[in-house]
């Protein structure tokens, strides 16, 4: 590739957060009309790198050049002006406004301060047509499906002549038809000379949309090749730093009880999942593996009374159980870890001991009275057992702990409660590597020693390999594969999930 | 951790990983000594209020010879008793992230209900009716908020108007005189006015509930994060409903005391009472976003408001200035709290 075609060149980018360097001098290059797939595990530095390119973060060292010219430090406004657009995984559109308004947000077609709706709708429809989107520009965005909203975001970027488009896992929540449409839009953009950085976890997408693939691992570039020259297993090896086969599997539990701790039959929720059957033995860790939107999270939520079901039965420790409400689920000995720690997990301003003890208050109380000292004792016990790093102060607000330590507290609350079945959704999302290993080890130990049954709903195949005794692969709300023992490998998982 | 199960990764990057882990280990471990003095425990929040109270008391004591007299102190407490009885459940609601604006018109409604029904069903019957009405008002508020999911600000704002209108209709726009019901408002067992005794009892119950009971702790959890509170198994709707019912009951008691003190029930009584309640509760350190606040803080807020009103009256200052002073105090207190939160690393 010659320099005339060079669109973006980042050289030697370094970035630290709180004294820990997460990017150790990374190079990234993009030519006109090129699509670069950027791969890497959670925490490898992908999002930090693209956020630096989009001006959200400033690099500690290194330089960024656009069309061969050094641009110095970028801020979001300047990055936009230079034609760099980022399309986030979580859509940042304004739901109550129309498609046209969203596309031209902040730069409405106006004459003398009066918005010309007709002109705006006409322009917007033009952009949508060029993407072969089959919806009307005057529709409200909130009435569109996720895939359509994604196209609106892309249309927005296109309408103001973006040169460089960064897509952060755009297909995570899309159906396969929507994915096809998105890929068609991407190819059309490529033909116009737009350069794209495409972040994904799905290896099969790489060959479909990308020209070149770059893998980040622990903040360094581990692989950078044209897609045609790389095999799938080379990509996996580059991502996890060892060949997929050599991942150490957990030791299987020695003896499992006869009757399962959790028995699910024909569980159905219209539009989310159908006919789900599985058992979790006491002492066993079962993973429900599937992409975001496959239904794994909804199945887990249904078991905790958070998601309505239309058919099926659940048995918890030999007693039939109808998941009605979280309070009811807790009463039946089920513990739950939500996917979104901030929103649904922690009571951030309340003391850490209180966060830990809350599900056990009834049990800890005499005559409806809970003593702070009882809570403090419980906290001290679990702080030690799970190596929770905090001040020794049980009154410290949980919001001041690191993500991994918060997550440990949220797990410990169910150990303290004496839950027999744990239902966890994405248990190590946003958790640093050290704490992640602690959490896996703790769950394995608790399962093995106390006969806890653990169900993990996750979209992280590596989590499945490191944590689970068995895995069910879920796609479009149905069980499409079951893997056990040595057969639980990253390749088998991604293959069964359809990439 | 005992006997780590072999989940460990034997990867080539393990050295780098260990380094990160030690870093995260040492940072918090070395900070407690350095960090402790800066981090605010709940105590300093109230310390600011105590300072304000002391300054006010010293100022008025110097300016007026009557201020520190035992009678005047009882006057102050009597003056805040009615508001205070309502402010205790008011604190509980705000801690849980809710607000009840119907308390003022609710108190007037209860008073007029008593005065208009006493001839028909006798004093005892009328008092029971008023208490039931208070519980019913609370239950309606609680049901609207929890079952139909109307925001409590809106629900109780609507209820404020409804109750005030019903009160006027019931009283036919007239103040109703009631005789033979003076004891509750004016009796002085052991020299202490009965309303103050009732207020003290309500405060003690409130402190015990909020500090030690599972119920009170649940309210803090709900206020801090309603979703998370539900997911730890707290029956959040039930707890909130109960608190609204308690608020309605307190309103009935306050309405009875108010009527007894005046020997009359006016349909325009207790106007703006809800705002005084919110002022006292917020002054006492409760957060409008929930999860923070104490009954003792509210008590301190009430006493400050009481002292301010009483002192300014003793100094013969126009009562409109009292409103101004109370407003300024509230804004100062909340601004101070914002500053404190911004400075503390917790938030």
Image: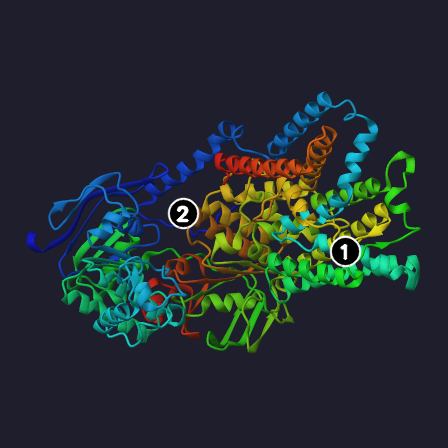
Q: Image point 53% across, 37% down: which residue? A: B335
Q: Is residue B36 left or right of residue B89?
A: left
Task: Name the residue rendered at 88%, 42% in the picture.
Answer: B186
Quarter the C terminus of chain A occupies: bottom left
Residue shown at 69%/31% (left/top)? B317
Coordinates of residue A473 in the picture (x, y in percent): 41, 70
Question: Which of the image's four quarters has the N terminus of chain A?
Answer: bottom left
Residue to which mark 2 is pinned = A432
Q: In the image, B261: left or right of B278?
A: right
> Residue B205 lies in what quarter of the image?
top right
Q: What residue is disc 1 on?
A: B267
Q: Quadrant of residue B337?
A: top right
Instruction: Classify mark 1: residues with Cα within 10 Å, few (<14), some (14-19) or many (20+).
Output: many
Q: Is residue A366 visible?
A: yes
**Quadrant of res A35:** bottom left
Q: Nearer the viewer, residue B161 or B189?
A: B161
Check disc 1 and report its element: helix, strand or loop. loop
**Mark 2 nearby-residue class (10 Å; few <14, some 14–19, many ≥20):** some
Looking at this view, is B56 or A467 the one in front? Answer: B56
Q: How many marks?
A: 2
- Chain assignment, label 1: B
Q: From this viewpoint, which residue is outermost toward the top?
A: B62
Mark 2: which secondary structure?
A: loop
């Amino acid at each position: 590739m010659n320099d005339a075609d060079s669109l973006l060149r980042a050289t030697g980018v370094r970035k630290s957060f709180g004294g820990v360097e997460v990017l150790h001098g990374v190079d990234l290059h993009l030519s006109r009309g090129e699509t670069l797939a950027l791969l890497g595990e959670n925490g490898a530095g992908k999002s930090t790198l693209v956020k630096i390119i989009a001006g959200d973060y400033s690099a500690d060292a290194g330089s960024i050049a656009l069309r061969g010219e050094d641009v110095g430090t970028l801020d979001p406004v300047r990055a936009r002006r230079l034609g760099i657009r980022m399309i986030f995984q979580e859509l940042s559109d304004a739901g109550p406004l129309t498609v046209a308004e969203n596309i031209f947000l902040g730069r409405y077609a106006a004459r003398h301060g009066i918005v010309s709706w007709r002109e705006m709708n006409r322009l917007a429809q033009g952009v949508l047509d060029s993407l072969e989107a089959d919806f009307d520009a005057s529709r409200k965005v909130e009435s569109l499906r996720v895939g359509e909203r994604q196209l609106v975001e892309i249309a927005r970027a296109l309408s103001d002549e973006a040169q460089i488009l960064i897509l952060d896992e755009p297909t995570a929540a899309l159906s396969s038809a929507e994915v096809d449409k998105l890929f068609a839009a991407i190819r059309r953009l490529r033909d116009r000379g737009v350069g794209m950085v495409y972040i994904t976890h799905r290896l099969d997408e790489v060959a479909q949309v990308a020209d070149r693939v770059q893998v980040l691992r622990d903040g360094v570039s581990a692989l950078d090749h044209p897609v045609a020259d790389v095999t799938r297993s080379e990509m996996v090896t580059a991502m996890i730093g060892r060949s997929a086969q050599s991942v150490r599997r957990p030791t299987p539990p020695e003896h499992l009880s006869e009757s399962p701790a959790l028995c699910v039959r024909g569980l159905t929720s219209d539009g989310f999942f159908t006919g789900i059957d599985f058992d979790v033995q006491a002492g066993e860790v079962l993973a429900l593996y599937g992409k975001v939107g496959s239904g794994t999270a909804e199945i887990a939520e249904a078991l905790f009374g958070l998601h309505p079901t239309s058919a099926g039965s659940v048995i918890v420790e030999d007693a039939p159980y109808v998941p009605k409400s979280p309070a009811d689920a807790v009463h039946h000995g089920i513990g739950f870890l939500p996917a979104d720690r901030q929103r649904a997990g922690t009571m951030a301003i309340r003391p850490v001991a209180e966060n830990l003890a809350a599900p056990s208050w009834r049990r800890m109380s005499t005559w409806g009275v809970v003593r702070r000292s009882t809570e403090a004792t419980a906290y001290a016990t679990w702080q030690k057992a799970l190596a929770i790093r905090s001040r020794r102060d049980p009154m410290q607000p949980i919001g001041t702990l690191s993500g991994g330590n918060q997550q440990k507290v949220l797990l410990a609350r169910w150990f303290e409660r004496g839950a027999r079945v744990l239902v966890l959704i994405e248990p190590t999302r946003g958790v640093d590597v050290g704490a992640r290993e602690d959490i896996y080890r703790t769950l394995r130990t608790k399962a093995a020693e106390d006969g806890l049954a653990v169900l993990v709903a996750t979209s992280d195949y590596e989590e499945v390999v490191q944590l689970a005794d068995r895995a069910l692969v879920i796609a479009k709300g149905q069980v499409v594969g079951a893997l056990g023992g040595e057969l639980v490998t990253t390749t088998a998982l991604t293959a069964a999930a359809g990439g | 951790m005992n006997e780590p199960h072999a989940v460990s990764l034997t990867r080539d990057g393990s050295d780098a990983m260990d380094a990160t882990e030690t870093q995260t280990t040492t940072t918090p471990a070395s900070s407690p000594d350095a960090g402790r003095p800066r981090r605010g425990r709940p105590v300093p929040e109230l310390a600011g209020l105590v300072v304000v109270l002391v300054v006010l008391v010293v100022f008025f004591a110097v300016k007026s010879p009557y201020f520190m007299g035992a009678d005047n102190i009882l006057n102050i407490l009597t003056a805040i008793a009615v508001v205070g009885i309502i402010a205790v459940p008011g604190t509980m609601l705000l801690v849980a992230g809710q607000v009840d604006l119907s308390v003022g018109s609710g108190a007037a409604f209860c008073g007029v209900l008593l005065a208009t029904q006493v001839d028909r069903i006798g004093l005892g019957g009328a008092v029971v009716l008023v208490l039931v009405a208070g519980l019913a008002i609370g239950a309606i508020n609680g049901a609207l908020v929890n079952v139909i999911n109307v925001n409590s600000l809106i629900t109780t704002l609507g209820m404020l108007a409804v109750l005030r209108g019903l009160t006027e209709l019931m009283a036919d726009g007239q103040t109703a005189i009631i005789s033979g019901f003076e004891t509750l408002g004016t009796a002085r067992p052991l020299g202490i006015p009965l309303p103050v005794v009732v207020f003290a009892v309500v405060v003690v119950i409130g402190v015990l509930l909020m500090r030690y009971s599972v119920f009170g702790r649940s309210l803090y959890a709900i206020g801090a994060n309603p979703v998370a509170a539900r997911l730890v198994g707290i029956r959040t709707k039930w707890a909130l409903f109960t608190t609204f019912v308690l608020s309605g009951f307190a309103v009935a008691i306050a309405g009875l005391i108010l009527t007894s003190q005046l020997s009359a029930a006016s349909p325009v009584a207790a106007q703006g009472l809800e705002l005084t309640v919110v002022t006292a509760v917020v002054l006492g350190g409760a957060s409008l976003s929930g999860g923070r606040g104490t009954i003792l803080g509210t008590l301190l807020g009430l006493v400050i408001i009481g002292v301010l009103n009483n002192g300014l009256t003793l100094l013969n200052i126009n009562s409109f200035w009292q409103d101004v002073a109370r407003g300024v105090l509230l804004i100062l207190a909340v601004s101070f709290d914002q500053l404190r939160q911004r400075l503390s690393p917790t938030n």
